[in-house]
Amino acid sequence: MILLIILISVAILFLLASYIFAAKVIFPKRFGVEETFEIEKENGKIDEKLFNSWKKEEVILISPFGYRVFGFYFPATGSRKTVILSHGITYTLFGSVKYMKMFMDQGFNVFIYDNRFHGRSGGPNATLGFYEKFDLKMITDWVEAKNGADSIIGTHGESMGAAISLQHAAIDPRIKFVIEDCSFNRLDTLLAHRLKKDYHLPRYPLLPMVELICKILTGMVIKEVSPEDVVSNISAPVLFIHGEKDDFIPAWMVEELAAEKNKGPKEIYVAENAGHAKSYWTDPKKYEDVVIKFLQSNSII
């Protein structure tokens, strides 16, 4: 009887631990809209006066999955080049603002938006690209309708947004370039890494149960959230960026990810001394130089 009680207790703890970890993936703690604006402003990453001076259009689209997707479109006079910026997990579109001027100075229209389950967008959970890639495809549809089928559309994503951008480009040949900043290579590999690093737990047997719980609650198949498996479908130029000292998504992932792109141009920039999603602010001039040279070398600008 004692052994049975112990076994039942262990099973309950195992299921509870699996659910808690799964919930961190699909129901991440999120920052509020105004909170992120204030954080970016206080850290000098948003110039409020400059941001408010930019001509912008509020855009609300309805996802193929029924929720609203909120964004801003910043038009450049007479431009047929647009970059769509995708933010990281827990954050909002204000996390993308730091990258905007770099593209505006090169004559791009800019579209920033809140990903599913973040900011002012809807959605019951986050799936790190499983559903979000179709929202990005919908935004691309909107931009194409706005500027014409022969316009140039590219994407820039940070962290989760980078993974979304890669998964989207793999199914949307209209995308003319992708700049991914600190994407994971595979979600299951990242989760196994976090289990070991954060909780000192092995991949098995916990991760298969986490995958099952995520599948039941969202329909997401974690093994299919894998930029590494689909990047070979991208023929457009891709710039892979990663912080050398990224302690959340380790830098070795960018090497594995880039190695799988075997069609079309690719470049890798590993930012010295940069942590997770910190490559831009660690050395803004270097970052901008790398991006602009990438766009120039691929005849985007």
Image (spheres, grey):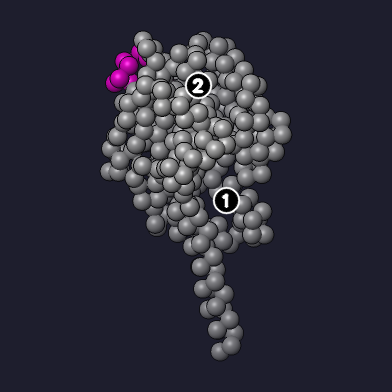
Q: Is 250 inside the magenta-drawn segment?
A: no
Residue holding disc 1? 191
Q: Residue at x 62, y 35 (%)?
A: 278
Secondary structure found at label 1: helix
Amino acid under disc 2: Lys
Q: Residue at x 41, y 19 (%)?
A: 109
Give the answer, above or below, for where 285 lies relative to 38: above
Q: Quadrant of residue 256?
A: top right
Amino acid under disc 1: Leu
Q: Is residue 287 visible?
A: yes
| Residue nearest the observer in this picture, 90 or 19 | 90
Q: What number is the disc on residue 101?
A: 2
Q: Quadrant of residue 269?
A: top right
* Image position, residue 136 (x, y; %): 39, 33
* Image position, residue 22 (x, y; %): 49, 57
Please tell me how crowded label 2 is: few (under 14), some (14-19), or many (20+) other residues with Cα within 10 Å.
some
| Residue nearest the observer in this picture, 145 or 109 | 109
Q: Which portion, as a residue range, is magenta?
A: 144-153
* Image position, residue 44 (x, y; %): 56, 32
Whole-number angstrom distance, CA of label 1 to CA of label 2? 34 Å
